Amino acid sequence: MFDTIIRGGRISTASDTFFCDVGITDGRIAALGADLGTAAEIIDASGKWVLPGGIDSHVHISQPSGEGIVMADDFESATRSAVIGGNTTVLPFCMQERDVPLREAVNAYHARADGECYTDVSFHLIICDPTPAVLGQELPALVRDGYTSFKVFMTYDGLALTDRQMLEVMAVARETRALVMVHAENYDIIRYLTDQLEAGGHTAPRFHATSRPVIAEREATYRAISLAELSDVPLMVVHVSNREAMDEIRRARRRGLKIFGETCPQYLVLTENDLDGLNMEGAKYVCSPPPRDAASQKACWEGIEQEIFSVFSSDHCPFRYDDPQGKLAPRGRTSFRWVPNGIPGVGARLPILFSEGVMKGRIDINRFVALTATNHAKTYGLYPRKGTIAVGADADIAIWDPDRRQKLTHAMLADGCDYTPYEGIEITGWPVTTLVRGKTMVRDGDLIGRKGHGTHLTRAISAYA
Ligand code: DUC
Ligand code: ZN
Ligand code: ZN
Ligand code: ZN
């Protein structure tokens, strides 16, 4: 007798596809097979595809974003959108604040997340001030406590690290076997071009893309890889937008380095032309790196097909458009320089890749599972508890209707933002039912689970560290 049996579905993992029933007890997968007997709850999955729940390893939730600017999502609304979009775990960032002990920052994010989440949650640490105390004591202690990944930035005032500081953080990562994620863009190129553009009166949102050219991303990607090679640490280059940066990753991998790449929906289905819009509408598409051109989209699809990219994340970073604390917070009306960088996507990520990737024949369903769940779990120390369908794993499952066709609308995503950059995209396939640790959170498209079911996950060391 199981708590739940999922009956009659077609199951896919990162490596296999097979038909069988799934028996769930105490939040875990207890049996896979035929004729499993009885259960308190039977879920009929005939005609449906049964996949590991999505893991989105790159989301920003309730992160301070500059004076007078507030993120559109708190943990309740972000994880609500996540679970409706077929996700069962998200990995947001805890951002260090200057002169505040890192542990205090971590505790503050826990206070915001505890009791609020529909999915499971675990934090990466953003390091912007690598003091001797942070490097020597705080980071090693936090890694021991299960915060096993750091993100560093090569651009942004107040966030950018020097090359030397990156080396110092990487040395700690080597020592503690933490995984380093990097935002790779050349800070001075962006500052220089931004000043030049403004001086020439070019302040509309589309010049955001002009100010952050491919060269700025390619150069920083190469530099970050070089620092990781010197430090002998694995590195995840996040939100890769174009061929040149991707080729740096490809070359490094050919040389046997453990360099990993992530790309995101905005680089597959948006372009810099979206930043053109009347008035300041283009601000809705301002993210960094910016969406590029059709050739870059094609390159990113190649990177997905050829496994240069191992993870596909949303980089969910939502700001409302029609809101004095959002995209056009007072100073934003005057120049792209002040528009907060980031767009929402946690709910749209999986349907976009399913529809554009699997249903259009660019990738198979096993690669979809690897890109959206399994590789995230392996990279960030959650495997095999998360990211697959196997006896003993958490029963984190999304049941997809591969035939459902609809236009994507913001209302379907149930987040805290007031738009989606993916409005109107034709989508085939939808995650109709989602279970988080055996609990049905979404049934036939309706949210039925309660917030607070989602819990914090202590992570092991990355499989690649
Ligand atoms: N980098 C991110 O990872 N997210 C949003 C903005 C940015 O620059
Ligand atoms: Zn909210
Ligand atoms: Zn970034
Ligand atoms: Zn991000």
Image (cartoon, helix red, strand yellow):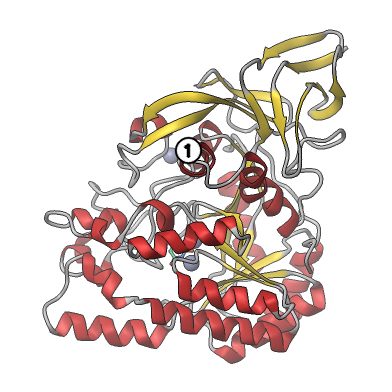
**Ligand 4 within 8 angstroms of badge 1 C-beta:** no
Q: Quadrant of residue 7?
A: top right
Q: Residue at x 23, y 46 (%)?
A: 322
Nearer the observer, 302 or 195: 302
Q: Residue at x 75, y 69 (%)?
A: 178
234 w.r.t. 186: above or below: above
Whether residue 247 is visible here, answered yes or no, is yes
Q: Residue at x 56, y 53 (%)?
A: 312
Nearer the observer, 166 or 75: 166
297 w.r.t. 437: above or below: below
Q: Residue furthest front?
A: 361
Q: Residue at x 78, y 72 (%)?
A: 140
How many numbered tags mark residues here?
Answer: 1
Disc 1 designates what residue?
355
Q: Position of residue 314 (x, y in %)?
A: 50, 51
Give the crowd class for mark 1: few <14, some 14-19, many >=20 residues within 10 Å: many
Q: Position of residue 376 (x, y in %)?
A: 67, 53
Left or right of 460, for residue 302: left
Left or right of 262, for residue 338: left
Q: Quadrant of residue 124?
A: bottom right
- The kind of secondary structure element at disc 1 is helix
Specify the quadrant that holds the C terminus. Answer: bottom right
Whether residue 328 is visible here, answered yes or no, is no
Q: Position of residue 340 (x, y in %)?
A: 33, 63
Q: Quadrant of residue 170?
A: bottom right
Q: Name the kind of residue labelled 1 in the image.
A: Ser
Specify the quadrant that holds the N terminus. Answer: top right
Q: Position of residue 375 (x, y in %)?
A: 69, 53
